[in-house]
Amino acid sequence: MTAAVISPTLPVLDVRGLTVGVRQQAGFRPILHDISFTLMPREIVGIVGASGAGKTVLSKAVVNWLEAPLAIDGGEVRFEGADILGLAAGDMRRLRRRVAYVGANPMGALDPTLPVGRQIVEKLMAVVPGSSRRESERRAIELLEAVRIPSAKSRFHDYPSQFSGGMMQRALIVDALITNPALLVADNVTQPLDVTVGAQVIRLMKELARDFDTAVLFVSSSLPVAREAASRILVMGEGRIVEEQATEALIANPRHAYTVNLVEQTPKIWSGGAATQPQATQSLETGSDREVVISLRDVSQIYRVKKRDSFAGVNEVRAVRDVTFDIRRGDSFGIVGESGCGKSTLMRLLSRLELPESGELLCHGGDIGKLRGKGLLDFRKRLQLVLQDPFGSLPPRTAVGRMLEEPLRAHGWRDRKVIRERVLKVMGDVGLAPELYEELPLGLSAGQRQRINVARALVLDPEILIMDETLSALDQTEQFKLLDLFQKLQREYDLTYIFISHDLAMVRKVCNRVAVMYLGAVVELAENERLFFDPGHPYTKALLSAMPVLETRRYQPEDCLLDGEPPSPIDLPTGCCFKTRCPLAFDKCDTISPSLMARGNRNFAACHLVTSQAAPPNSQSGGQPGPRETEYQSA
Amino acid sequence: MFVLAFLARRLVQGLVIVFLVSLLIFTLLRVVPGDPVRLMAGGMAPEALIEQIATSMGLRDPILVQFGRYMGNVVQGDLGQSFVRPANGAATGGSSFNDATRGERAKVADLIFETLPMTLQLAAVTLVIALVFSTIIGVAGGLAPGRWPDKVAFYVSSIFISLPNFWLGIVLALLFSVHLGWLPAIGYNGFAYTILPAIVLAVELSPVLIRTLVSSVSSQMGQSYVSVGKVRGLGHARIVANHALRNASVPLLNLLGVQFSSLLGGVIIVEFIFDYPGLGLLTINAVLQRDFPLIQGIAIVTSAIFVVINIVVDLVATTIDPRLEY
């Protein structure tokens, strides 16, 4: 329609002196100060900054989508030469055909009660009046196929709740690009996604933007992620653009202090050398004769969910499958994997919140499933849990000191003075000021709250701490501080940590031993160095290749990155559970499920391609080979 | 397939519910004081006669035996016969009791299915009035939280919930029938007789519907699909009509399923006030006369209706929102 002839030198987007803030009764508080930049046709520009830098406000202002109390105080957003900030609602709506937006929350973006395809068609027909329904449907299905949504024709009729996060985000990219826009604003699109899926989404978005001649403003809180997508990057700090350079130049040679800091704080996996080596790895790598504190023997967990279309049928969700490993005193044991891989179920089993369907969990040789009464209470004291959500996990109307006293009281402490002393000691250990004793946790930051959570676990003087995504809610700086704290506490209290995480960079930094999970099974179990420098399982390689990093990759996404998403744990594929996404799958994988094969002394991977470098560990019971480390040592 | 499995499961559950309700009512009716035979035979009847009648009617058997016999008949569609009412009409007292008239006693099923359509008609008109009224007030309130339509919705529902239905019934009858002469009020002789009682019941039903609508519409308007809809290029009217209202209707539907029971409670009083010949009036008379088989029959029929309505409500709710599992 009005896709008038625009000379290629004219920018698609030209933001000039944009100032946006919060308008309240108290006055105007600016969030964005005097932002100016341009975006040429077909260009992909990244905007990077820490949380709170004003990136989301900027991306909303660019598509003229600010809602009260946010207000524009000055400046222009010129789209194809005309300022769009002053447009009437109706005119702006027609312009949505040319200006598209994809946000960070794919799951909430569509009406949950209508099929995805129908809503994409509805949008197309609303924005491009006069398009026929049949033609729109055809185009939607075509694009859904283009973003590799499997069996797009039937997926078209599925509801948002039947889409995974990654598929939903791809459907929303289709929704944004279906009208052939000149500008796409992508606000943190990969943030809620797993790394392998996020990498796919970026790749598809780049492909589509190229095919459709769409310019993309790629907003992200992660510099490595923006590097994947953008050719030029603007760095935002505290509402201002502090630096602008071509991507590679920016990373190689950051000029502004804020950017330098941003580059430095990005975790390094391979290039850090000895400086980033976890102390645990250094001192403990060879110490495999340490005492085993937790031991899993063929642990499985099955959840039964009612089948929707049958009278009494149930689906079995095999959340954890035949997991076997040992955790030794002083270990920092990492359990990694993407959403749905069974990490959280394993956490519930380890902490005996649930009992396994089969197999045993031994703590110091005793089956924790058999513990009752006093024995169970002792086990609880030994093993404590630190949770993920710093806000939901603290009772809002209880004083900090009181929260920390609670576990002591539950374990039979009565003397108020002794309790108080103990609590104050632990508060000091985790770096909480004693004045907080009588305070409510209301005004505390996420980092402070996580310290309370750690203190609450530590107050009972446990041997083992399970950290379930404990750091994922914190920003980079806070994460570093808490990791230092964890290492200090480990030395002082002789603690054993189990980190459950999806963040490989964090695991690289702190864990000496790592289990990689996929679809409920451990597919690789290895020492830190070996896992990151010589992984034995294609899935581990894929994870490593998909990690957004600033350094040179050891594993290239082109060789290792997976298409698609994990199959449903309800109907697992026969043979190897990874074969549906494995670039190396061959006929044996179709029928035989690989068990963990030894690769050297203490490393194992469940892949047929692993040729045992040592004799496989002989199995003691029931013919199922698995890493019986204790025996293996003595052999 | 889903629908069939759903219906099969829910109908089985429903049968269990109806059975339990019957057992409960049956037992309670027989342990409360007041001998129905005494009522039937009249205060002057000799004790021996009463015993004789009671034994011949099986009223001296153990409760479970009586219940078994009763349910056996119910399964065959026979709800028994009224203790008190003759088949030919008006209720009779016990003084005219003699064995010869027993055969003329009204069948409970007939009594119920004569009056049930009247009550269903009343309930339907009530529902239409209440839904139209609450939707207008409630949706307007939900779309403008904190502003005047929200306040109107709040005041209207507060006032309506504080009006006692018997008082409102009498006032409306005085106003519209006696003073203005627009609508008839007493008895039933055509559709116009349904309107006044329906208004009274609708006033009773509306406040909860309005409150639910206001809160569900305003919470839906705060959902991200609404604000994202705007940036996707959907118009406000389309977002509200096609998406927000669709989502907001699910809590309303569920509420209706539950409110139906209180509607039946309201029917009893309102039908009594307007002398409306429906199930409510029948219930009151049955209770006053200790007409066990009739009370029992009404309980079974209303609980069955309640079960069916809730099945329908859940089925409609799952069609609107496929995430729901019942």
Image (cartoon, coloured by chain):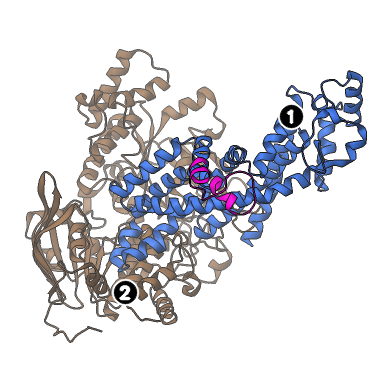
Q: Does B89 sit above or below residue A101?
A: above
Q: Residue at x 47, y 49 (%)?
A: B251
| Chain on which label 1 sits | B
Q: In the image, is B61 to the left or to the right of A433? A: right
Residue B80: horizontal and vertical position, in percent? Answer: 82, 41
The local crowd at label 1, few if under 14, some if 14 to 19, many if 20 or more residues have their Cα within 10 Å, is some
Give, as a single range, the part of the protein colored magenta: B174-198
* Residue picked out by circle 1: B29
Q: Is residue A332 visible?
A: no
Q: Does A179 sit above or below residue B284?
A: below
Gap between marks 2 and 1 measured at Cα: 66 Å
Residue A232: name its quadrant: bottom left
Depth check, front residue: A78 or B197? B197
Residue A202: horizontal and vertical position, in percent? Answer: 30, 68
Q: Is residue B111 visible?
A: yes
Question: What's under tag 1, amino acid-wise?
Answer: Leu
Question: Mark 2: which secondary structure?
Answer: helix
| Chain on which label 2 sits | A
* Residue picked out by circle 2: A127
Residue B183 falls inside the magenta stretch:
yes
The hue used for chain B is blue
Q: Does A211 sit above or below residue B286?
A: below
Question: What's under tag 2, amino acid-wise?
Answer: Val
Q: In the image, is A577 to the left or to the right of A387? A: right
